[in-house]
Image: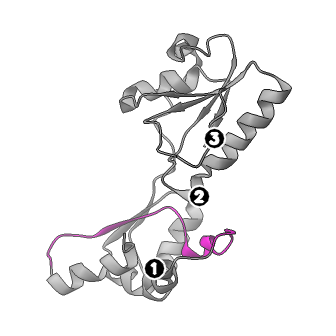
């Protein structure tokens, strides 16, 4: 919970011989674009980020601009590892609406994310589901994963929760959806 920048100082103090590889999927500067206030750890992390980069032996970056970002911070071994998954696993031949019991005859929207992270914006998905239900009751929203504990949140009845599935089964769920929200 302290964030990468603060915890990355620990290996330097321990003098570990193990290499440190930093996975970079965003810059702290991106957080400034959010409407929510920047957390103290992220404000502090901005100062520590260049120190953290000096401790990293390499970086895995989810976009080419982030490879440049890593290199500008002094990480000389930065590798592009795009977001996503193996495209051979995700194909339309896997389309089977029965993976979503109760939504087989609906226009299916699958939501991928975590209700634990505010930037995944689960609330906006719920607002969309409630609004679209008034327009077309045959639009269903599928959430794969454990139902979140959201006591203050009303869940529209066109949002259906399905249990978590193993990674290699995920492509079947995306293939069965008409739209994916991430």
Q: Which residue is mark 2?
A: 119
> Of helix, strand and loop, which one carries label 2?
helix
Q: Quadrant of residue 32?
A: bottom right
Give the spatial CA distance, label 1 vs label 3: 31 Å
- From the viewer's perspective, is residue 153 above or below residue 142? below
x, y (%) of residue 61? 47, 61
Which numbered disc flags the more N-terminal residue, 2 or 1?
1
> Of helix, strand and loop, which one carries label 3?
loop
Assess disc 2: are there few (<14), some (14-19) or many (≥20) residues with their C-alpha within 10 Å of its C-alpha.
few
Region of the chain picked out in magenta, as a range: 16-36
Q: What's the residue at 50%, 78% (across, down)? A: 42
In the rendered image, residue 24 lying in the magenta stretch gets the answer: yes
Q: What's the residue at 39%, 66% (across, down)? A: 59
**Label 1 vs label 3, nearer the camera:** 3
Q: Give whichever of 33, 79 is nearer the camera.
A: 33
Give the spatial CA distance, label 2 vs label 3: 19 Å
């Amino acid at each position: 919970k302290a964030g990468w920048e603060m915890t990355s100082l620990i290996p330097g103090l321990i003098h570990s011989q193990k290499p440190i590889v930093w996975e970079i999927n965003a810059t702290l500067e991106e957080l400034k674009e959010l409407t929510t206030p920047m957390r103290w750890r992220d404000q502090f992390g901005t100062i520590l980020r260049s120190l953290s980069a000096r401790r990293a032996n390499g970086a895995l970056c989810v976009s080419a601009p982030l490879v440049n970002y890593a290199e500008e911070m002094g990480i000389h071994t930065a590798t592009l590892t795009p977001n996503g998954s193996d495209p051979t696993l995700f194909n339309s031949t896997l389309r089977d609406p029965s993976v979503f019991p109760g939504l087989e005859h609906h226009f299916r929207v699958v939501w991928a994310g975590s209700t634990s992270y505010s930037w995944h914006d689960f609330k906006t998905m719920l607002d969309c589901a409630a609004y679209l239900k008034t327009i077309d009751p045959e639009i269903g929203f599928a959430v794969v994963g454990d139902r979140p504990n959201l006591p203050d949140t009303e869940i529209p009845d066109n949002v259906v929760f399905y249990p978590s599935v193993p990674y290699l089964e995920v492509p079947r769920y995306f293939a069965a959806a008409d739209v994916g929200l991430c």
